[in-house]
Amino acid sequence: MNRILLHFEGLTVLGIALYFYSILDFSWVLFLVLLLAPDLSMLGYLINERIGSVIYNLFHTYIAPAILLLGGIILSVSSILAIALIWIAHIGMDRTVGYGLKYPTGFKDTHLNRV
């Protein structure tokens, strides 16, 4: 049951990010170009699993994009808002399909698998 709630939570975050992206009338081309950009953090796994998991998790928690979103709001910079919403949508999308934060024991060992 907990896993289902976490997947639904990801879907909710994805939906909210898409809603605000849409009503703010940002570029859908930019959205498609940047949607998978946080997955470049997987390159950290080329070093080793511990470093890979740390780098991956830094790009797959809501902390950094939430700070970016707040900065975009405070500074009234639409490009920052767009990037933050795309990043948040990416994380929500990942959680929806079952990709979670990584443990250093292996790429497929995530917080969603241990719930």
Image (cartoon, rainbow, N blue to C red):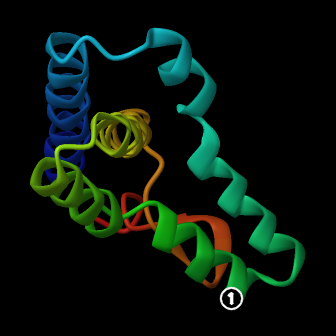
Point out the residue furthest to the bottom here: 50
Q: In this view, does 66 lie to the left or right of 64?
A: left
Q: Is residue 46 left or right of residue 107?
A: right
Question: Where residue 79 sits in the image (x, y, percent)?
Answer: 38, 37
Looking at the image, which residue is at 41% across and 41% down? 83
Question: Where residue 74 sits in the image (x, y, percent)?
Answer: 11, 56
Q: In which quarter of the image is residue 15?
A: top left
Picture layout, residue 58 above or below residue 9:
below
- The residue lying toward the viewer, choosing from 99 and 71, is 71
**Disc 1 designates what residue?**
50
Point out the residue furthest to the right here: 46
Picture layout, residue 35 above or below residue 56:
above
Looking at the image, which residue is at 19% across and 37% down? 13
Looking at the image, which residue is at 25% across and 11% down? 25
Q: In this view, does 72 lie to the left or right of 40?
A: left
Instruction: Name the amino acid, label 1.
Output: Arg
Q: In which quarter of the image is residue 9?
A: top left
Screen quadrant of the C terminus: bottom left
Q: Quadrant of residue 70?
A: bottom left
- The residue lying toward the viewer, choosing from 10 and 113, is 10
Picture layout, residue 35 above or below residue 54:
above
Element type where label 1 sits in the image:
helix
Q: How many labels does the image show?
A: 1
Looking at the image, which residue is at 23% across and 65% down? 67
Label 1: how many Cα within 10 Å (few below 14, some 14–19, many 20+): some
Question: Where residue 14 sits in the image (x, y, percent)?
Answer: 26, 30
